[in-house]
Amino acid sequence: MPSDSSLLIRHAQILQPDGGFRVGDVHIQDGKIVRIASHLELPSDRSIHEIDATGLTLLPGVIDPQVHFREPGLEHKEDLFTASCACAKGGVTSFLEMPNTRPLTTTQAALDDKLQRSAQKCLVNYGFFIGATADVLPDLLDANPTPGIKIFMGSMHGPLLIDQETVLKKIFSTGSRLIAVHAEDPARIQQRRQQFAGIADPAIHSQIQDNQAALQATQLALRLSQQYQRRLHILHLSTAEEAELLRQDKPAWVTAEVTPQHLLLNTSAYETIATLAQMNPPLRSPHDNAVLWQALLDGVIDFIATDHAPHTLEEKAQPYPNSPSGMPGVETSLALMLTQAVQGRCTVAQVANWMSTAVAKAYRIPNKGAIAIGYDADLVLVDLNTYRPVRREELLTKCGWSPFEGWNLTGWAVVTIVGGQVVYEHGKINADVRGQALRFDA
């Protein structure tokens, strides 16, 4: 469907910006929401495409603020086309991607290359972080458009690993753009790697990269953020200790996220899915799950990201520690969280806030994250009445597996709309749709 045509969604249960719901119609024109009403009468016109949304719930499209889509350089795991198809199927209409591709996204030229690739391949909207290196390249402050600077304080080798406080201080003290950190202490991890050397049980991963390693790095990032009054975002918070630290002292300019896997999986997963449960930072204890959930409910944690980081099953089948860390997530994240809402752990409105509205606010992405007149028509219709299991053979991610395989979920996307265009409908992808580069207003 061309972007200049009209789209009319009828009889949907519409999430309103105040968190309430109303049954009604939404009229979309030229990629924007132009009218919302209990009932809309439009002239009979072949260019108006109607969707009967009776029994379905209309939510703002998910903005996934942390993914690894592997292109360029690692396309055997995933590429921008396959990843964006998986996004569309999962109700994800925009993503922010990380810089650890090959080549690394540390220059304007590398950023431009990703933007050009995405314009040709991506079915959903896209944005890309710029990666910090120890030599602090000039493009770190000047490259555009980008949601911010990504610092790997741990779980990385090569130029993207920054483990010296002097370098961190230089980055935190220069410029004003948002800094997002992967916070794990590399010195502690290295020491514990030696301590537990020779153990091939993947469950040891959670002990090597333990809670203390995460806490120490988060403490350092917070200290530097406060010292330089620098906008800080803490990626994939995973421990009770970090959540309690933020609960005690979280400056207004600091935000944090959590992944569905750190809310819903714990170290018991190693017994059933072995290295498929291996990620960075690792899965933690049931106690950590509970404290993270409460922090999310209380607003200590601001939003949700998947950290979609696919590897092939062959790569994952290698014995630990040769097995790579990371798991896919964009296809299942919305259904996972909506299932929690239906089961009473949170509300549907909270899920939409954590997965869309709060992300748009934190990264200053204009006209997204709400169903309101004048906003971009990035929307998802979900079915909250039907349960369906996660099946490996139905996944669109190139890696072809999920740590949640077999989980029976509700809230699956039925229709996904990007810029007013139907990109996914009743199990079918419209591969002709293209998303747009996201803007990040200063």
Image (cartoon, grey):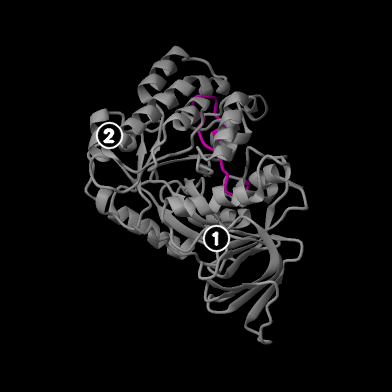
Which residue is denoted by mark 1 in the rendering? 370
Q: At 71% across and 41% down in the image, what residue appears? A: 344
SS for tag 2? Answer: helix
Q: Main secondary structure of the magenta part?
A: loop
Looking at the rendered structure, the kind of residue marked 1 is Ala
Q: How many marks?
A: 2
Q: Is residue 232 above or below residue 200?
A: below
The answer to whether residue 214 shows anywhere in this view is yes
Which of the two discs, 1 and 2, labels the residue nearer the N terminus? 2
* Quarter of the rendering occupied by the N terminus: bottom right
Residue 155 location, x and y as percent? 41, 31
Classify 10 Å Cα crowding around label 1: few (below 14), some (14-19), many (20 and above).
many
Which picture quadrant has residue 173?
top left
Q: Is residue 335 above or below residue 85?
A: above
Region of the chain picked out in magenta, as a range: 316-332
SS for tag 1? Answer: loop
Looking at the rendered structure, the kind of residue marked 2 is Gln
In whole angstroms, how far apart are the C-alphas of marks 1 and 2? 34 Å
* Quarter of the rendering occupied by the C terminus: bottom left
Classify 10 Å Cα crowding around label 2: few (below 14), some (14-19), many (20 and above).
few
Which picture quadrant has residue 318?
top right
Q: Is residue 335 above or below residue 366?
A: above
Residue 347 location, x and y as percent? 66, 47
Q: Residue furthest top?
A: 195
Which residue is denoted by mark 2 in the rendering? 227
Asked whether 73 or 153 is in front, the reply is 153
